[in-house]
Image (tube, helix red, strand yellow):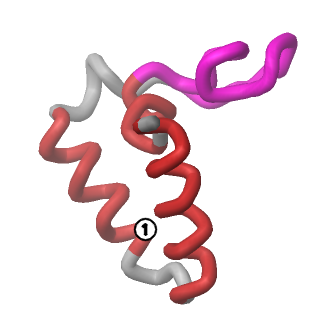
């Protein structure tokens, strides 16, 4: 979900609630997949364990 948000921006109905308006740009034409993964890994490295666990749960729910 985080990769999709960075690659494609916030897309209402997919990575944001329907009707949500955001200035989050898409970076698919700016960053490679490897660069996006590196940026997210860096950001997530500063998250406390409780937040990492919550994000992991969201990821698992999205995969099922």
Q: Quadrant of the C terminus?
A: top left
Residue 63: % across, % down = 41, 37
Place residue 25 in its image quadrant. Answer: top right
Residue that protrudes farthest toward the bottom in the picture = 49
Q: Circle 1 is placed at which residue position?
A: 43
Q: Nearer the viewer, residue 3 or 55?
A: 55
| Left or right: 13 as drawn, with respect to 33 | right
Q: Which residues are magenta?
A: 8-25
Instruction: Determine whether 41 is above or below 20 in the image.
Output: below
Q: Is residue 19 magenta?
A: yes
**Label 1: element kind:** helix
Q: Is residue 61 left or right of residue 43?
A: right
Q: Is residue 6 left or right of residue 16?
A: left
Q: Residue at image x 38%, y 27%? A: 7
55 to the left or right of 45 = right
Taking 44 as reference, is 24 above or below it?
above
| Image location (x, y in percent) of residue 16 | 71, 27
| Predominant secondary structure, magenta span | loop
């Amino acid at each position: 979900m985080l990769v999709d948000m960075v690659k494609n921006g916030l897309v209402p109905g997919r990575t944001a609630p329907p009707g949500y308006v955001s200035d989050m740009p898409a970076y698919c034409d700016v960053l490679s997949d490897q660069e996006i993964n590196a940026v997210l890994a860096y950001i997530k490295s500063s998250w406390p364990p409780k937040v990492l666990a919550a994000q992991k749960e969201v990821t698992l729910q999205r995969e099922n």
